[in-house]
């Protein structure tokens, strides 16, 4: 019997979580090159965060399926609840909106899943790390086999410290840029230390999802480990 061709490989499904001030539509555009190099290997399903970034005023939670959600800048939590803003550098005692985001992701797993893996960028990657921790602790709302974290970081909010108490055993690929000025490489490296046996991929660029031929090899080698899970 002939071996199955590459085109016959099962397609992995990834849930994608965008960065702060992005949304489903903008992140789909920014992952166009990645989706192209993963064609036939992985399907990426994008969703929009529930928190609207105000200009100015308090945040409002809307239905993620509404037409307006396709254009509005969104976030997964606010590090400054007083003005509903976010800065990855903030050392804060209290945040807001994270539970709403957990519910949004859980809804996606129920209505759009199942998913083999979860992909996050920037604030979305920081959220992915928390989801890994929750799943590892037995949260049945989330079930996936691996995580891809691009420009991720460890939240500096004291109330989020619980997500980093135990080593995270979920298989993970961490991608970050050597010249990223939004999330400097040392912040991504700090997050990597909380994972067991992480795979890392660095690139010479800044704050974006890299998808060159060189990076394609690493992505595919990592994803190929999970084809048996399909």
Image (cartoon, helix red, strand yellow):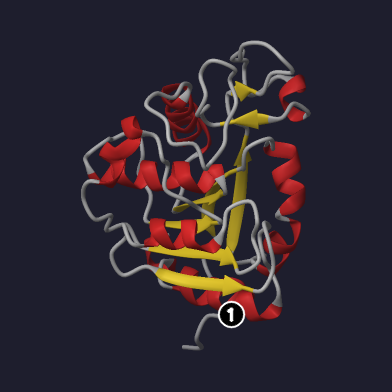
Q: Residue at x 69, y 60 (%)?
A: 35
Q: Residue at x 22, y 39 (%)?
A: 138
* Residue 114 seen anywhere in this rendered image of the structure: no
Viewer-proximal residue among 139 and 52: 52
**Please, what secondary structure does the residue beneath circle 1 have?**
helix
Query: Residue 159 location in percent, x, y?
Result: 32, 30
- The image quadrant where one finds the C terminus is bottom left
Q: Which residue is mark 1?
A: 217
Q: What crowding class fits label 1: few (fewer than 14 Cα within 10 Å), some (14-19), or many (20 or more)?
A: few
Above or below for 104 versus 10 = above
Viewer-proximal residue among 36 and 69: 69
Viewer-proximal residue among 89 and 50: 89
Determine whether, in the image, residue 41 is placed left or right of residue 131: right
Query: Residue 135 location in percent, x, y?
Result: 29, 42
Query: Residue 126 location in percent, x, y?
Result: 47, 45
Choose top left, top right, bottom left or bottom right for residue 72.
Answer: top right
Viewer-proximal residue among 157 and 122: 157
Q: Residue at x 44, y 67 (%)?
A: 227
Q: Residue at x 53, y 31 (%)?
A: 76
């Amino acid at each position: 019997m002939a071996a199955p061709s590459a085109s016959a490989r099962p397609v992995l499904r990834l849930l994608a979580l965008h960065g702060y001030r992005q949304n489903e539509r903008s992140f789909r555009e920014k992952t166009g090159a990645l989706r192209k190099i993963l064609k036939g290997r992985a399907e990426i399903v994008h969703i929009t965060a529930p928190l609207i970034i105000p200009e100015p005023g308090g945040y409002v939670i809307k239905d993620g399926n509404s037409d307006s959600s396709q254009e509005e800048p969104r976030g997964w939590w606010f590090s400054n609840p007083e003005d509903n803003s976010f800065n990855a550098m903030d050392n804060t005692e209290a945040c807001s909106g994270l539970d709403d985001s957990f519910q949004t992701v859980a809804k996606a797993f129920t209505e759009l899943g199942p998913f083999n893996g979860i992909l996050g960028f920037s604030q979305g990657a920081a959220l992915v790390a928390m989801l890994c921790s929750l799943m590892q602790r037995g949260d049945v709302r989330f079930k996936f086999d691996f995580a891809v974290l691009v420009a991720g970081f460890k939240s500096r909010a004291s109330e989020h410290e619980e997500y980093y108490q135990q080593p995270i055993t979920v298989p993970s690929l961490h991608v970050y840029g050597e010249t990223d000025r939004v999330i400097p490489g040392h912040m991504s490296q700090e997050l990597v230390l909380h994972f067991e046996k992480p795979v890392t991929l660095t690139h010479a660029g800044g704050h974006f999802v890299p998808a060159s031929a060189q990076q394609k090899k690493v992505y595919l080698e990592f994803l190929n480990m999970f084809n048996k899970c399909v």
